[in-house]
């Protein structure tokens, strides 16, 4: 470039800066302070936090607007139809004029933005090169898509007023699909609203950007080089049309099949090994359904219709007799990564994830000429729910179709799911406010807000970004929060000039040790498709549940459920704001009899002892309690370590004036027994472990847990409960007989307290159950100075672990169960030997082929063992009624 060209360029830049000086100064100030505003802590610095949060959310767009205004104004300093501006009165090359405008934009927009960000990142503790890289990157890549169109407008319109009118016209065009009047025309063109390609929109972004650039260059060429205004307008109109049909593509041009097909070809490798690890299965035995005419039916019907959220036009089109039903489906994979954890003190598991991309359903029958695609609600109440293993869709069967196939036995429903398989790369991030760099996540920091009981996480990265970023409290998967509600497929090369800042907030970190949190980058490994087929309409297996009018007695039979155990229920305070459910079977007939304090297993309540407690109460004073985080007990965000749970037991005993007791614990209840036996032996005359005496944090236990995790992923889950099997306790016994081969069930009160009768799923929040697991500690058996009885359920052969719903002839199932038996037998043998040898006064009872709920499967043996143990402890003999 010669000196003359440089003088021309600098002269034009100087002229434009002076001509737009007020706007330039305003823009520089906004660009410089925008990063500062966005980084402020609204809750800490402002009394009106909501106002500051609103300012933070919109200040970027204020700067974006001023930047666009500067670009357009600079171009219009020298409009194409002027006869007096410099570029026409003097022989200025078009290239020099164009370079001058670009230099103006760099000086007045880019430099202030980069400088402001650079200073901010330096102050936040980033190194100089990293701060510069972050500052020079594009903050919001989607915002770049509009800039070529705005440049074309600035070139085409001679003044700001006409530019605004042109902008309003373009915005009006892109808002047309929102008008009900224009929808018939759009449908005629094949444009389907609601078909947003979540996570795959980058495929549309490329033609939008390239078309915008081509349009801007064409407008510049025709106006400034050829002075052909009509052709410039035509080029602009064509570019807007192409962009419109790219944003709202006709189905014949671009649809879900093509979008998924393109991504499948880009993501999937020739090796299809991963395909076998992805499964999909219904959560319920049938799909809840109701007719659209049941607007004022049962609460379940109303909730189903409310959650479906059908639009008025859809319900009108479906017609009378239309059926709405929901499908709750679990997608799972059998892949796990193990990472070392400082907080846990051992390796922890991070399962791969399956993210749903699309769901479809078709209904077929011999009486129908062809398959009928079913409408899926894209306005359902859960449409913005984060990605999860269990998701619910809502479907609509038109009334005329439902009537036509009502008596057709060949009816079949087929559901198709397209999903992405995500692999994790996980790191522990210290919660100390310091910046740590991770290759996949960039520069990250986490800070604890003690007042709000939250942890704020912030990660900044330039270039390629993971499909999903998540944070969670270590050991508490249900605390996980994601950066998006769906995985992002944008390729790394397209994000090369971009910068992303991810902000996540974890709640209730006081549940566990939160000195570090788990931060994961999720990458898409494969796009997979799965089908689920069901036969028939209502009353068929894995089909629609019976409609309300078909089963008027079902809701009435729900009243058959009741807790009939003769206990007194109370709620006892163990600390401020925390109350525990206590069940009391004590009576005045034998006030001096020994007291048994019963502790339930993990995810169970005191009601799990409803039946055996009645029989124990014939000789003893019996009390049971539900630990915090479960059932009717309080669910505080603290206090789930073994020591605090043990203190809860002591507090309940103090409140009930129980000076000493024999402590009986099932499963995880052994943790409280071991802690209290070692630290408060003076309060207990004996300990009874009901398949509960295990070291759950030893190296061997963790090694076995890894293999257990892998093996159990291969085994099929227990079949779900059918609606007719949940109407009463007796009916549920038939379910147990059908699935387990035996009619043994937890007590009726326990089922009411712990299980969802519709699905059979546990009702307790697993967040608190996992917090209990994270608070485990190794039992200190030598310090237990009180007598202890360990009752163990030990399988005698692999057949004892072979559930009735397993495919017994499947070699893989046989091998898996056999290995599980070997691990279980060896581990229990080691635990029994340790219990018997390390506790000074111990005795062991092994019950062959006992269930883990050993006091249910072998009630008489357990009762006899407890009676003999109490007799030994309270020599010479137990009291009789």
Image (cartoon, grey):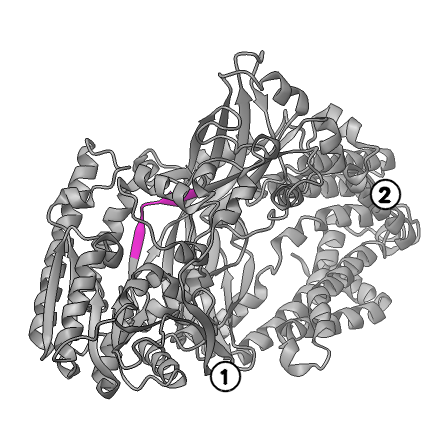
For the question of whether residue 601 can be seen, the reply is no
- Relative to 290, is 464 on the left or the right? left
Percent coordinates x, y for residue 640 in the rendering:
38, 74
Q: What range of the chain is rendered magenta?
A: 330-337
For the question of whether residue 290 can be seen, the reply is yes
Q: Secondary structure at mark 2?
A: helix
Classed neighbour count for the residue bearing mark 1: other residues with Cα under 10 Å, few (<14), some (14–19), many (≥20): few
The quadrant in which the C terminus is found is bottom left
The quadrant in which the N terminus is found is bottom right
Note whether 806 is above or below 58 in the view shown: above
Q: What is the chief secondary structure element of the magenta stretch?
A: strand
Measure the C-alpha gap from mark 2 to mark 1. Answer: 63 Å
Q: Nearer the viewer, residue 435 or 736?
A: 736
Residue under label 2, please give it.
169
Q: How many marks?
A: 2
State if disc 1 and disc 2 touch (CB < 8 Å).
no
Q: Earlier in the sequence, mark 2 or mark 1?
A: 2
Percent coordinates x, y for residue 257 in the rendering:
54, 29
Q: Is residue 878 magenta?
A: no
Toward which corner of the image does residue 520 lie, by quadrant?
bottom left
Residue under label 1, please give it.
576
Residue in view at x 26 percent, y 39 percent: 741
Q: Nearer the viewer, residue 45 or 158?
A: 45
Percent coordinates x, y for residue 218 in the rendering:
74, 38
Q: Secondary structure at mark 1?
A: loop
- Relative to 693, is 603 on the left or the right? right
Percent coordinates x, y for residue 203 in the rendering:
57, 39
């Amino acid at each position: 470039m010669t000196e003359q060209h440089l003088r021309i360029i600098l002269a034009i830049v100087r002229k434009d800066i002076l001509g737009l000086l007020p706007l330039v100064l305003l823009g520089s100030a906004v660009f410089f302070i925008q990063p500062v505003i966005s980084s402020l802590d609204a809750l800490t610095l402002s009394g009106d936090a909501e106002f500051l949060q609103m300012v933070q959310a919109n200040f970027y767009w204020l700067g974006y607007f001023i930047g666009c205004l500067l670009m357009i104004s600079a171009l219009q300093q020298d409009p194409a139809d002027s006869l007096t501006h410099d570029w026409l009165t003097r022989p200025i090359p078009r290239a020099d004029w164009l370079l001058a405008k670009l230099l103006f934009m760099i000086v007045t927009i880019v430099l202030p933005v980069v400088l402001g960000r650079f200073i901010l990142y330096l102050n936040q503790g980033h190194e100089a090169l990293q701060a510069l890289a972050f500052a020079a990157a594009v903050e919001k890549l989607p915002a770049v898509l509009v800039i070529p169109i705005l440049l074309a407008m600035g070139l085409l319109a001679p003044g700001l007023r006409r530019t605004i009118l042109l902008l309003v016209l373009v915005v009006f065009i892109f808002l047309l699909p929102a008008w009900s009047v224009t929808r018939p025309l759009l449908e005629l063109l094949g444009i389907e609203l609601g078909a947003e390609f979540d996570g795959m929109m980058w495929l549309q972004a490329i033609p939008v950007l390239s078309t915008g650039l081509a349009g801007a260059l064409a407008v510049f060429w025709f106006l400034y080089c050829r002075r052909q205004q009509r052709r410039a307008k035509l080029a602009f109109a064509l570019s807007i049309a192409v962009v419109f049909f790219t944003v709202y593509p006709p189905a014949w041009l671009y649809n879900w099949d093509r979008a998924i097909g393109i991504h499948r070809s880009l993501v999937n490798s020739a090796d299809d090994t991963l395909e076998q690890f992805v499964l999909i299965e219904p959560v319920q035995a049938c799909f809840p359904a109701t007719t659209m005419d049941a607007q004022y039916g049962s609460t379940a019907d109303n909730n189903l219709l409310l959650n479906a959220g059908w639009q008025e036009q859809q319900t009108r089109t479906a017609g009378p007799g239309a059926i709405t039903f929901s499908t709750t489906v679990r997608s799972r994979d059998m892949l796990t990564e193990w990472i070392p954890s400082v907080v846990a003190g051992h390796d922890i598991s991070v399962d791969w994830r399956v993210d749903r991309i699309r769901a479809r359903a078709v209904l077929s029958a011999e009486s129908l000429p062809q398959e009928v695609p079913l409408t899926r609600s894209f306005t359902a109440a859960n449409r913005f729910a984060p990605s999860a293993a269990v998701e619910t869709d809502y479907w609509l069967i038109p009334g005329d179709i439902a009537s036509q196939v009502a008596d057709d036995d060949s009816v079949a429903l087929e559901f198709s799911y397209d999903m992405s398989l995500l692999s994790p790369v996980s790191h522990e991030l210290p919660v100390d406010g310091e910046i740590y760099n991770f290759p996949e996540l960039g520069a990250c920091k986490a800070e604890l807000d003690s007042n709000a009981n939250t942890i704020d996480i912030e990660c900044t990265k330039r270039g390629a970004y993971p499909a999903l970023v998540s944070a969670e409290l270590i050991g508490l998967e249900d605390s996980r929060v994601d950066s998006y509600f769906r995985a992002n497929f944008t390729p790394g090369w397209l994000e090369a000039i971009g910068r992303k800042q991810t902000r996540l907030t974890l709640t209730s970190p006081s549940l566990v040790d939160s000195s570090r949190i788990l931060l994961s980058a999720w990458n898409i490994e494969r796009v997979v498709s799965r089908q689920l087929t069901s036969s028939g309409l209502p009353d068929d297996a894995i089909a629609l549940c019976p409609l309300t009018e078909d089963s008027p007695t079902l809701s009435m039979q729900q009243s058959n459920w009741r807790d009939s155990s003769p206990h007194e229920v109370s709620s006892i305070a163990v600390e401020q704001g925390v109350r525990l459910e206590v069940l009391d079977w004590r009576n005045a007939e034998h006030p001096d009899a020994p007291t048994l304090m019963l502790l339930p297993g993990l995810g169970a309540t005191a009601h799990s002892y409803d039946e055996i407690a009645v029989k124990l109460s014939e000789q003893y004073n019996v009390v049971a309690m539900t630990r915090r985080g479960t059932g009717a007990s309080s669910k505080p965000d603290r206090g789930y370590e073994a020591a605090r749970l043990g203190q809860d037991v002591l507090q309940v005993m103090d409140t009930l004036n129980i000076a000493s007791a024999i402590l009986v614990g099932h499963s995880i209840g052994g943790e409280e027994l071991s802690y209290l036996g070692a630290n408060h032996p003076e309060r207990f005359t004996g300990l009874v472990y009901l398949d509960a005496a295990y070291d759950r944090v030893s190296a061997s236990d963790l090694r076995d847990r890894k293999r257990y995790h892998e093996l159990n992923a291969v085994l099929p889950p227990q079949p779900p409960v059918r609606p007719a099997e949940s109407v009463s306790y007796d009916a549920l016994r038939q379910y147990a007989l059908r699935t387990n081969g035996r009619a043994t069930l937890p007590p009726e009160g326990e089922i009411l307290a712990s299980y969802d009768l519709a699905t059979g799923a546990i009702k307790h929040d697993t967040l608190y159950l996992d917090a209990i697991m994270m608070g485990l500690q190794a039992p200190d058996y030598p310090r237990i100075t009180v007598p202890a009885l360990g009752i163990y359920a030990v399988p005698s052969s692999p057949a004892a672990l072979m559930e009735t719903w397993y495919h017994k002839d499947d070699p893989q199932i046989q091998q898996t169960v056999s290995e599980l038996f070997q691990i279980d037998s060896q581990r229990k043998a080691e635990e029994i030997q340790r219990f018997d040898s390390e506790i000074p006064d111990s005795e062991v009872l092994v019950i062959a082929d006992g269930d883990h709920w050993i006091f249910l499967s072998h009630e008489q043996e357990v009762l006899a063992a407890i009676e003999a143990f109490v007799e030994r402890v309270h020599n010479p003999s137990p009291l009789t009624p």
